Amino acid sequence: MATVTTNYGTNTALTVTNLHSLGNGSWWQSASIDNTSTKALWMEVFVTILTTTTAGSNANVDVYLAGSNDGGTDYAGGASGSEGSYTVTANSSDQLRFIGSMPVDASETTARTFKWQVAVHDLPDTFAILIENNSGTAIGASTNAVEYRLNKFDSA
């Protein structure tokens, strides 16, 4: 009988220049992530957000995935696959895959790291990670980070 083991990938940091100082109600998107050679079945996403004392009492940062099954030409929700801002148009955010919500309320006055494992089955061959700031204020001007790790299973 075959033995199946988890094959953890390498943490990869994304460029987050446009995530710094992201205004409340605004969106950020990552550059395209290529899964065509890794063929990962699931991934982990690690987010670091610098919070401020003026964040709302029930504030959060929501994380999404915009998939592309044509090699990165068209992305769900009209994402571009280029690091920068993302503009929501009529129902475009409904086409994104919700990954999770990170609480960032007023009690958090320094960078808060929220890490979680996301078991997203059938990852697209190409995708981008999107973040929506629902903190009630702009997030910090530095310290923010987004990393991902593509994982799969090996059978021997």
Image: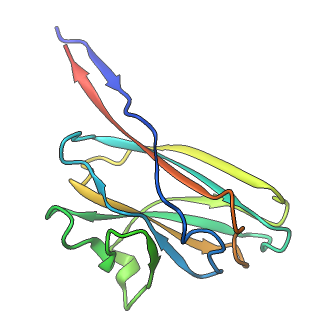
- Image x and y of residue 50, in percent: 72, 60
**Residue 93 higher or lower than 14, as above or below:** below
Front residue (pair 98, 65): 65
| Quadrant placement of the N terminus | top left
Query: How many numbered marks does the figure carry?
Result: 0
* Residue at image point 26% right, 71% down: 75
- Image x and y of residue 156, in percent: 19, 13
Report whether 32 appears left or right of 2: right
Report whether 104 appears left or right of 2: right
Front residue (pair 20, 137): 20
**Residue 12 higher or lower than 47, as above or below:** above
Report whether 42 appears left or right of 18: left
* Residue at image point 70% right, 68% down: 141
Quarter holding residue 8: top left
* Residue at image point 72% right, 78% down: 136
- Image x and y of residue 61, in percent: 61, 66
Report whether 1 appears left or right of 10: left
- Image x and y of residue 35, in percent: 25, 48
